[in-house]
């Protein structure tokens, strides 16, 4: 049985061959030289001197295959869209549950606890800062105490400034008992501090509270009450 091959470039016939090997050489050469792409070529196989296309069934199968692939792609696309919709619905449900949870007593209690903890933390920070300031004032007043003590030992009938008497006595007492620390001083001060004393170590600076003629250097004293 004699057969022939018709080569179509897209929809145009560009050659007729009665030898499949020669045909393949032609096609391969054109592809190598980029005259056209493989997808642009269609080859139909006929009986010589007839209109009987031997590979028409194959073409139908190809069309069926393409149609099946398209159907599969469409189904896959639909599935992806369904999954996307389900995910969106799930997100909306989660948002709704979250909003409902925010109205619950459990959530309200949790948020209140969070606020209370933050308040306590800020309170502790403030207390720490105040304690550091108090300790700084304690050390500063300690230097004043040492200077006044020296002057008291040097000068007969030397009077401690009235505004510093209470603190001087506490410093002196603690020094004698070898307990002159900030922590112990704070306890003792709480026992004797004036009622109108707003803060243990609130700053009330003043200069030149007293003058002593035999002090070798000028002394400016800030005393915290």
Image (spheres, helix red, strand yellow):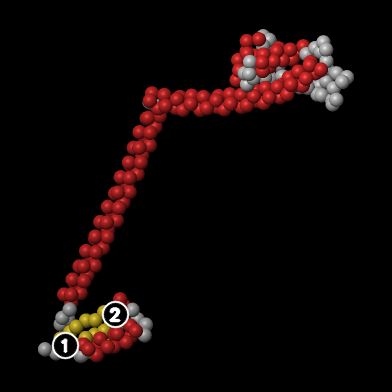
Front residue of 86/149: it is 149
Image coordinates of residue 67 in percent, x first then y, are: 23, 65
Local packing at callout 2 (Cα closer than 10 Å; few below 14, some 14-19, many 20+) is some
Q: Nearer the viewer, residue 206 or 152?
A: 152
Location of residue 190 in the rendering, given as x and y in whole percent from the top left corner: 62, 13
Q: Secondary structure at mark 1?
A: strand
What quarter of the picture does the N terminus occupy? bottom left
Instruction: Identify the residue at horizontal 67%, vertical 26% (top origin).
Output: 136
Q: Is residue 157 above or below residue 201?
A: above
Residue density around tag 1, few if under 14, some if 14–19, many if 20 or more, within 10 Å:
some
Q: What residue is disc 2 on?
A: 41
Q: Residue most toward the right?
A: 213
Q: Position of residue 166 (x, y in %)?
A: 71, 12
Q: Residue at x 20, y 74 (%)?
A: 59
Disc 2 is placed on an element classified as: strand
Residue 10 visible: no
Direction from residue 123 to residue 213 in the image, left or right: right
Kindly identify which residue carries mark 1: 3
Residue at 66%, 15% (x, y): give it.
Answer: 176
């Amino acid at each position: 049985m004699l057969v022939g091959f018709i080569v179509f470039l897209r929809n145009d016939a560009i050659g007729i061959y009665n030898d499949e090997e020669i045909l393949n050489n032609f096609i391969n050469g054109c592809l190598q030289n980029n005259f056209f792409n493989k997808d642009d070529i269609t080859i139909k196989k006929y009986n010589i001197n007839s209109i009987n296309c031997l590979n028409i069934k194959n073409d139908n199968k190809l069309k069926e295959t393409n149609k099946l692939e398209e159907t599969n792609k469409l189904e896959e696309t639909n599935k992806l869209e369904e999954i996307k919709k389900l995910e969106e619905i799930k997100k909306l449900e989660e948002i709704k549950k979250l909003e409902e949870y925010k109205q619950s007593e459990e959530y309200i209690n949790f948020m209140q606890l969070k606020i209370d903890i933050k308040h306590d933390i800020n309170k502790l920070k403030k207390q720490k800062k105040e304690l550091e300031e108090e300790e700084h004032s304690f050390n500063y007043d300690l230097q004043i105490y040492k200077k006044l003590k020296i002057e008291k030992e040097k000068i007969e009938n030397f009077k401690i400034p009235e505004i510093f008497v209470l603190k001087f006595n506490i410093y002196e007492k603690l020094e004698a008992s070898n307990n002159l620390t900030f922590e112990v001083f704070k306890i003792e001060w709480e026992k004797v501090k004036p009622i109108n004393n707003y803060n243990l170590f609130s700053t009330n600076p003043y200069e030149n509270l007293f003058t002593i003629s035999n002090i070798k250097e000028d002394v400016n004293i800030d005393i915290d009450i």
